[in-house]
Amino acid sequence: MSVKTFHLKDYEKIVGHQVVEELYLIGERTKGLKIRNVNSTAVGGGVAEILTRMIPLLKDVGVDASWDVIKGNARFYQATKRFHNALHGNAADLSEEDFDAFLATSEENGKAMDMSGDVLFIHDPQPITLIEQKSRQKGKWVWRCHVDVSNPDQRVWDFLRRYMDQYDATVFSAPMFSRSLPNRQFLIAPSIDPLAEKNKELSEKTIQSVLDKYKLDLSKPMVTQVSRFDYLKDPIGVIEAVEMVQRYVDCQLVLVGGEAADDPESTEVLAKVRERAQKNPDVHVLAIPSGSDVEINALQRASAVVVQKSIKEGFGLTVSEALWKAKPVVASAVGGITLQITHQYSGLLCHSVEGAAHQIKQLLQNPKFAEKLGKNGQEHVKQNFLLTRHLRDYLLLFLALTHDGDVVHL
Ligand code: UDP
């Protein structure tokens, strides 16, 4: 898939001249730095989404940025998914063999990967053991945690701590995830790219063609959740909530999702969601291939309400994506979502299926209120969660880690 990329200058029309000039200025100090990013999947999920947009922009300001993906077999990804669930507090399936499978593949990746560079930027738990190469490399090592770790299973947390503690710095998405660690901690929220196919303005014609493609019509207002098919996104809970709303307001639900290469559970979740949705002709389940960015953009734009009923959420890019399109959002009050939504100002927060149903109904019955929330949300995203702010934070992080004390006093 070829991804259309942009130059920093292109963002001026959205964020203004000053923001862009400042980025070029900071970029003067980070020029030529070799930043090596490593994660576990090239497509699917928020981390891949951000790296796809961030790498070209880093290059545009002169950073020598690269991105590698670790390799793993099905057993490895089963183990890492269990770690992921355990970090979110559910360790039911975790076994000793998972740790063994994780370590075996991690060792192979460690041997196979070139980890030279000024900053080794390791994303999430899957590649965390690469830190064992540290003694052989002179770069600075950063572990970037995108996961909601406010209440992790202690066993997995202790296991990961052995690696985490060796990093020069850690980055978390939100203050509520920061932990007592021996290294420097940075808090950097994720971002969306307003110029990406997923977020750019679309014509009515394009939106309509996507609706036609999926045989959707807007005779009933559309409530949408865009998410990987994962229990932590609670797709069944969304169906239950919308069915409660349907007793009062004639509306339809669209659940849009794809699979992430590093998530072995998604096929099972999708099957369950399809089975549950079968009974209701106004619940549409769309499993779409990765890279269907215009489709997702169009479906978000065509929605009367966007939902993100996650059980846990590191950040929830889908919330920013919807708010950027000035959509009213109902989302769970968990993790990074609470950075994005101030209840009754830039969206509505919920804590249960019944709560979600109540909020969705409220928005469908009060379009003026819904519009106001969407507008406020759009402004909030503009100020806080666009790629340019994220780029600035990353450049300053690189500078903080690599500068050699040559501070110029004015
Ligand atoms: N996404 C996508 N196709 C899908 C489902 C999700 O492109 O079928 C995108 C979604 O638009 C968002 C990202 O994947 O940009 C998901 O990021 P988020 O932080 O919401 O959740 P994660 O998947 O990382 O838990």
Image (tube, grey):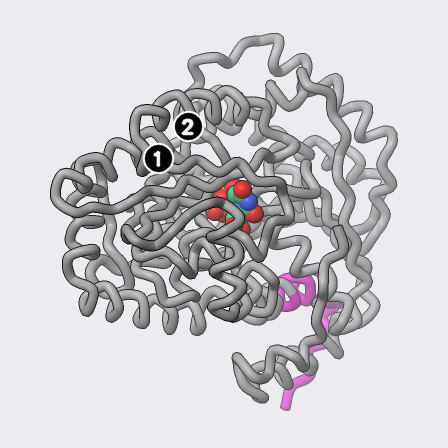
Is the residue under label 1 in contact with that under label 2 (CB below 8 Å)? yes
Pointer 2 or 1: first along the chain: 2
Residue beneath the point at 54% across and 85% down: 16
Residue 99 location, quadrant: top right
Where disc 1 sits, the SS reads: loop
Q: Per the image, is 150 magenta?
A: no
The span picked out in magenta is 395-410
Corner quadrant of residue 134: top right
Q: Residue at x 55, y 68 (%)?
A: 200
Of 322 and 141, the residue lying toward us: 322
Quick check: is 407 in the magenta stretch? yes
In which quadrant will I find the C terminus? Answer: bottom right
In this view, the residue in front, 252 or 396, is: 252
Q: In the rendered image, which quarter is residue 264 located in?
A: top right
Query: x and y percent of residue 126 in the render?
Result: 64, 32
Mark 2 secondary-structure assignment: helix
Q: Residues within 10 Å of mark 1 (few under 14, many from 20)?
A: some
Q: Give percent across and percent down for residue 61.
A: 74, 73
Q: Nearer the viewer, mark 2 or mark 1?
A: 2
Q: Can you identify the residue that label 1 sits on?
A: 311
Q: Amino acid at mark 2?
A: Tyr
Callout 1 amino acid: Ile
| Badge number at residue 268 | none
Q: Which residue is mark 2?
A: 231
Ligand 1 closer than 8 Å to label 1 CB: no
Q: 202 above or below 78?
A: below
Left of 379 or right of it: where is 369? left
